[in-house]
Image (spheres, helix red, strand yellow):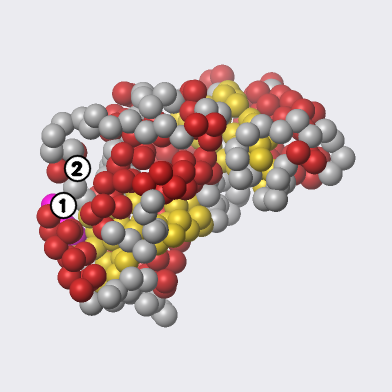
Amino acid sequence: MKQITKAADLQQAVNAAKKQNLEIGLVPTMGALHEGHLSLIERALKENDFVVVSLFVNPIQFNNKEDLEKYPRTIEADLDLIAGLISRMEGRKAQELLAFTPSVEEMYPQGEPKEVYHFGPVEEVMEGPRRPGHFSGVAVVVRRLFDLAQPRRAYFGEKDYQQIAVIRALLEQIKYPIELVPCPIVRADDGLALSSRNMRLSPAARAIAPTINATLEQAAEMAEFEDVDDVKEWVLDTLASFHEVNPSLCPDGLKFEPEYFEIVDARTLQPIDNWEAAGDLGAVGCIAVWLDGVRLIDIVKF
């Protein structure tokens, strides 16, 4: 593994790989790596000759300044995790991995980018109206990473389900022949979806956070005999009332504050009002919940 911080150095390495007809895999991350990220990197190492892992906290996708400031930055620990994965991994195809850790100035040498992306209905639901400019900011940085790494494949985790749909729409707009590879959510033993933000949870909040996934799993079972609206209402009510039903687990007023739970068509991300309205990929439930001042997201497939 080699760490590089300059875009020019990345381009030079990529051009050399291209001359050798090596297939390149890209894993874009914002650092603070966990086993979920490592699963993406492991898959990329198995499926490509040359892998680029970016570790960059992208300021233009944050519409909340406090969230940007509090986002964990653990570059040295991240590099150690990647090195450990490589050392113990068997059967990998890639012989080279570059960890790209640029500064904001390196990624945006002209200052804050002026380009703005629009993706229509896929960004007008769920995260879109609640985080204005977020998906455009994601698209800007991902487009730049695509231009620098010139990957054959790019790997993203399904926890950010709407983001995957946006990246797919981006690829359709810019006509890049890149294979988007969605990868399954990795969960802790208690079911909590792994997230860099989990490290910001207090011990008490971390103890009850698995309730999110447990509630979603029960919702998937309910879908066999309950209407869409009834399932949605039950999920929101169950989480919002958790602190009342379980006061001993919620000291100091700790409580879930659901921001939304939507059941949508898995391809278009448009809300459905009955199960038969879902298309060929079925339906997916997407949730955002505040817990202990930390915003957590998760999904369930129906």
Lateral position of residue 21 relative to residue 106, left or right = right
Residue 215 image offset from top left, x and y in percent? 69, 38
Residue 177 image offset from top left, x and y in percent? 39, 59
Q: Residue at x 31, y 39 (%)?
A: 140
Residue closest to the eye, 101 or 77: 101
Lateral position of residue 40 relative to residue 235, left or right = left
Label 1 neighbourhood size at 10 Å, few (<14), some (14-19), many (20+)? some
Quadrant that contains the N terminus: bottom left
The amino acid sitting under disc 2 is Met
Mark 2 vs 1, N-terminal side: 1
Q: Is residue 119 magenta?
A: no
Q: Residue at x 48, y 28 (%)?
A: 128
Residue closest to the eye, 266 or 184: 266
Q: Disc 2 marks which residue?
A: 107
**Which quarter of the figure has residue 4?**
bottom left
Span highlighted in magenta in the image: 3-7
How many labels, in total? 2
Residue 8 image offset from top left, x and y in percent? 12, 55
Q: Residue at x 60, y 49 (%)?
A: 190
Q: CA distance from mark 2 to mark 1?
A: 7 Å
Q: Is residue 212 visible?
A: no
Q: Is residue 41 above or below residue 256?
A: below
The amino acid sitting under disc 1 is Ala
Q: Helix, strand or loop at disc 2?
A: helix
